[in-house]
Image (tube, helix red, strand yellow):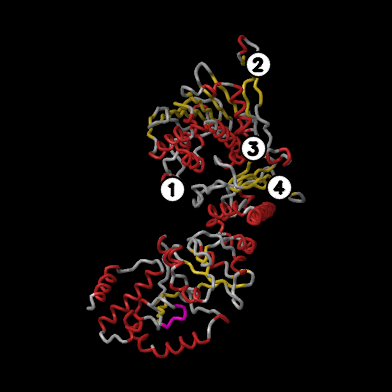
């Protein structure tokens, strides 16, 4: 056996942890009770993990398979102790999980802080700090733990006053699991009262599916003081909430269960509780959070829906339970059909699990459809928080593509507002007679999309255009190519096809101008050289002198820039340079005899077209020099 280091070391907290601890103490003072819920939830998670791990190794129970959480207090020592006999932690796990704070979203968290205590307390809950909430009421916290299956000599003690550092040492710990002792601050005597602690546990943690026990107290001693006995009693109902009938569950219980499974301090936006019967029986209790967690875009995030088999925890956060585009959903799926000894390898191929996943997705989409129809304000909140993630749906869930598309919301020229409130059904209801396409434009910002020169002709004709500026939008339109039989068409790719809405006179004008300006077009092409694939007269411009257009089936220029920004190599694609034959600058270009001035003006028009789509110039200094030269009449 490898020798265990028994030296006691003092280590410093990360800077972020110091800030978190300060905020915990000063921002959550009005809601102190939540620390007990967080510690009990952590103990419950540890018990769930042991149950699952012990499916393959029963020896991990070490002769004690009765999982529970103990809550004790000592008035004389002013301590409150929460003990679980779950999976426990190794020394390295203690350093990783307690000495540091969650890596994902840390920077976003601190950037969002305002200094307003009420708002910051909500952010703390959104970030999910769990264990650190102990310091709301304690000026010193001692944690002792041992991982199941390890020898007693491999116990670990962690201790901190919640300031700049913590100590870590190896101890003998005969019992597996974790014991957390809070040395309470002055003025926190409420948490040394048995009745008060019981009421908090019943309020916040009654739904925990393993027993939470306290020493039974009898009242009748001198001066009515409580006398403790060595008899333990279960304080909570200790039954799986999702297994109960709906009419047996209060709104408060539903809410507290959500806070338990999500580690969120806020109430959920919506929920669904359903039992599916038949050959494949399972129960769903799923929630939509009211706000996006900071790790929503973390690819390694493992939080999400938990899978139970007959109330025994199996796994959490797997794409086998919920697709990535619904990764914000929290809750529980409990199957009666899967085998209890199911392994993660078996789950990879299990057809029953595929059916459970499919059924759960349909239920969530149904919940969203109900919100969109009957509670539009709640749906607007959902879309603001999770719309970008939900837009990944048509990309990865072809089977439900139409249902997902119906639920999506966009900004459009109908309002010119950055708020994404327009559904595809809304768009279709406003289509002009004879219009057979859904027009859209992608850009890196709403402002760039709204002011794009590509929209000029469509605005003139009163045609609505969807303004897509989320990073995911370019991928989305690559998979969502039509809706309700109507193709989606980019107004910045290929020739602008307005079908029967195009005026014959406009077409004739473009054809005539193209013939008349052939010498000019060739001259511009020679000047711009490899920068462009083609120069042509534009049918889409009414006010701007020029614009850049991508090939019909090529990658959009917005997508090119996104790919390059994340270090992805993309094949060099030359844009088409379209000119407006009626614009004064193009007319001036046509009659410019001086080759130097012609070259400067052609390059300036090209650079203006680049800038108008929100992109950066390859050589800003050259643009400024040319522009200054033209302004001086040189």
Per the model, the C-alpha gap separating discs 2 and 1 is 50 Å
Q: Which segment did they paint magenta?
A: 536-541
Where residue 625 sits, quadrant-wise, is bottom left
Q: Nearer the viewer, residue 374 or 554?
A: 374
* Residue at which label 1 appears: 108
Q: What is the x, y in percent for residue 514?
A: 42, 87
User: Judging from the image, what secondary structure is the residue with disc 4 in?
Assistant: strand
* Residue at which label 4 appears: 274
Q: What is the x, y in percent for residue 475?
A: 51, 64
Q: Are marks 1 and 3 in contact (CB under 8 Å)?
A: no
Check the image and name the residue furthest to the top: 222
Where residue 194 sits, quadrant-wise, is top right
Residue 9 appears in the rendering: yes
Assess whether residue 539 is covered by the magenta stretch: yes
In this rendering, the label closer to the viewer, 1 or 3: 3
Residue 349 appears in the rendering: no
* Residue at which label 3 appears: 252
Q: Nearer the viewer, residue 44 or 467?
A: 467
Per the model, the C-alpha gap separating discs 1 and 4 is 35 Å
Left or right, 78 with reference to 523? right
In this rendering, the label closer to the viewer, 2 or 3: 3
* Residue at which label 2 appears: 218
Dominant secondary structure, magenta: loop
Q: What is the x, y in percent for residue 580?
A: 41, 81
N-terminal-most mark, 1 or 4: 1
Q: Is residue 462 above or below residue 49?
A: below
Q: In the picture, which quadrant includes the C terminus?
A: bottom left
């Amino acid at each position: 056996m490898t020798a265990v280091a028994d030296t006691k070391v003092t280590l410093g907290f990360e800077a972020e942890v110091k800030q978190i601890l300060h905020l915990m103490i000063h921002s959550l003072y009005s809601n102190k009770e939540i620390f007990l819920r967080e510690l009990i939830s952590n103990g419950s998670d540890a018990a769930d993990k042991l149950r699952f791990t012990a499916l393959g190794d029963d020896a991990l129970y070490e002769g004690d398979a009765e999982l529970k959480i103990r809550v004790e207090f000592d008035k004389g020592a002013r301590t409150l102790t929460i003990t679980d006999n779950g999976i426990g932690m190794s020394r390295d796990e203690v350093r990783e999980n307690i000495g540091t704070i969650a890596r994902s979203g840390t920077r976003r968290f601190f950037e969002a802080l305002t200094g307003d205590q009420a708002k910051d307390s909500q952010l703390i809950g959104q970030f999910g700090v769990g264990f650190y909430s102990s310091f709301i009421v304690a000026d010193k916290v001692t944690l002792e733990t041992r991982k199941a299956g390890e020898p007693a000599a491999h116990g670990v003690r962690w201790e901190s006053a919640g300031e700049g550092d913590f100590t870590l040492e190896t101890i003998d710990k005969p019992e597996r699991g974790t014991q957390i002792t809070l040395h309470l601050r002055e003025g926190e005597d409420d948490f040394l009262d048995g009745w008060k602690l019981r009421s908090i546990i019943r309020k916040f943690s009654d739904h925990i599916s393993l027993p939470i026990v306290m020493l039974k107290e009898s009242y009748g001693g001198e001066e009515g003081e409580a006398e403790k006995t060595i008899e333990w009693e279960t304080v909570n109902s200790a039954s799986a909430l999702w297994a109960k009938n709906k009419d047996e569950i209060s709104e408060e219980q539903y809410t507290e269960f959500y806070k338990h499974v999500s580690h969120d301090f806020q109430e959920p936006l919506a929920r669904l509780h359903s039992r599916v019967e038949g050959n494949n029986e399972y129960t769903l209790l799923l929630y939509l959070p009211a706000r996006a967690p900071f790790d929503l875009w973390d690819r390694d995030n493992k939080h999400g829906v938990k899978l139970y088999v007959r109330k025994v925890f199996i796994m959490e956060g797997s794409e086998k339970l919920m697709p990535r585009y619904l990764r914000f959903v929290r809750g529980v799926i409990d199957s009666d059909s899967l085998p209890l000894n199911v392994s993660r390898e078996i789950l990879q191929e299990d057809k029953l699990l595929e059916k459970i996943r499919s059924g759960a997705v349909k239920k969530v989409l149904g919940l969203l459809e109900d919100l969109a129809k009957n509670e539009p304000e709640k749906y607007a909140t959902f879309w603001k928080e999770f719309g970008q993630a939900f837009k990944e749906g048509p990309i990865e869930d072809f089977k439900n593509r139409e249902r997902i598309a119906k639920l999506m919301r966009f900004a459009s020229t109908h309002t010119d507002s950055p708020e994404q409130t327009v559904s595809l059904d809304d768009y279709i209801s406003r289509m002009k007679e004879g219009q057979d396409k859904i027009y859209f434009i992608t850009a890196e910002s709403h402002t760039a999309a709204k002011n794009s020169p590509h929209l000029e002709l469509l605005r003139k004709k009163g045609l609505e255009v969807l303004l897509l500026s989320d990073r995911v939008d370019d991928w989305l339109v690559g998979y969502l190519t039509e809706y309700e039989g109507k193709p989606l068409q980019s107004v910045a790719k290929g020739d602008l096809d307005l079908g029967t809405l195009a005026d014959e006179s406009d077409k004739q004008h473009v054809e005539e101008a193209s013939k008349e300006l052939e010498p000019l077009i060739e001259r511009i092409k020679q000047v711009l050289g490899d920068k462009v694939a083609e120069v042509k007269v534009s049918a889409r411009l009414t006010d701007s002198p020029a614009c850049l257009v991508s090939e019909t089936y090529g990658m959009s220029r917005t997508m090119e820039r996104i790919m390059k920004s994340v270090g992805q190599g993309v094949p060099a694609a030359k844009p088409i340079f379209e000119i407006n034959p009626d614009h004064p600058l193009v007319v001036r270009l046509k009659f410019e005899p001086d080759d130097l001035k012609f070259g400067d003006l052609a390059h300036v028009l090209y650079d203006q077209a680049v800038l108008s789509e929100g992109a950066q110039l390859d050589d800003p200094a050259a643009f400024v020099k040319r522009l200054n030269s033209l302004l001086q009449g040189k």
